[in-house]
């Protein structure tokens, strides 16, 4: 199932004579709610003190981020909990740091943090974040480019 890639490819046309913002962020919580593995994570949610938590912040307009969520959703191994959030909710680097302490300046998505028994053990963004997510879920980080490759849209 590629529900997150389908969200990325979602396009709704505005009424004639009007323009409006992309509605992927609006639809994201509904798509996450359908996932048996991923949970929508709010900034008020607390990191569990037991087990492993992988927190992944994505840009809903990024096909690579959406394919990452599809790949994580389809894994059988990895953290006890995979939380996800839309980075459109982050208006500053402080917003990222409040969710993933010490992540620093985030210039590329995804923003990723990994906790074990309540302790943050890894954090990163962009390619480094993808590597953390892949390794945490037992995926081969050497395969990131091939697994997240976007196929062209049919003509």
Image (cartoon, rainbow, N blue to C red):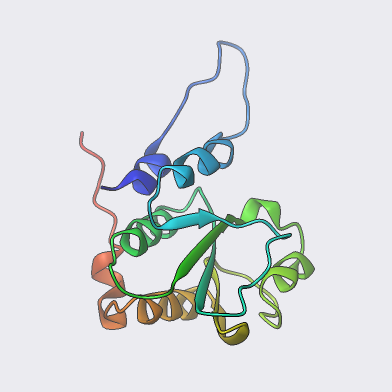
Name the spot of residue 53 as percent of width and height, x first. Answer: 52, 74
Residue under the point 75% across and 57% down: 91
Q: How many marks?
A: 0
On the picture, is 107 further left or further right than 150?
Answer: right
Nearest the eye: 91 or 45: 45
Does 93 sit above or below residue 14? below
Does 50 sit above or below residue 99? below
Residue under the point 44% across and 71% down: 80
Name the spot of residue 120 as percent of width and height, x first. Answer: 61, 85
Residue closest to the far front:
50
Nearest the eye: 112 or 45: 45
Does 89 sit above or below residue 19? below
Name the spot of residue 71 as percent of width and height, x first. Answer: 31, 62
Residue under the point 26% across and 41% down: 153
Nearest the eye: 127 or 95: 95
Name the spot of residue 51 as percent of width and height, x first. Answer: 50, 79
Instruction: Please tell me in which quadrant of the rendered image residue 122 appears.
Output: bottom right
Residue closest to the far top:
16
On the picture, is 69 further left or further right than 51?
Answer: left
Residue under the point 73% across and 59% down: 44
Residue closest to the far left:
155
On the picture, is 94 further left or further right than 58?
Answer: right
On the picture, is 41 further left or further right than 138?
Answer: right
Q: Quadrant of the C terminus?
A: top left
């Amino acid at each position: 199932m590629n529900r997150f890639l389908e969200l990325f490819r979602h396009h709704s046309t505005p009424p004639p004579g009007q323009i409006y913002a992309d509605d992927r962020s609006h639809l994201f919580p509904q798509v996450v709610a359908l996932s048996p593995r991923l949970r929508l994570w709010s900034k008020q949610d607390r990191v569990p003190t037991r087990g492993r938590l992988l927190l992944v912040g994505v840009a809903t307009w990024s096909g690579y981020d959406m394919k990452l969520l599809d790949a994580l959703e389809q894994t059988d191994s990895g953290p006890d909990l995979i939380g996800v959030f839309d980075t459109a909710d982050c208006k500053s680097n402080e917003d990222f740091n409040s969710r993933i302490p010490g992540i620093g300046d985030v210039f590329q998505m995804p923003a990723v943090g990994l906790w074990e028994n309540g302790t943050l053990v890894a954090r990163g963004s962009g390619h480094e974040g993808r590597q953390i997510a892949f390794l945490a879920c037992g995926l081969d980080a050497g395969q990131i480019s091939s697994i997240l490759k976007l196929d062209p849209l049919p003509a």
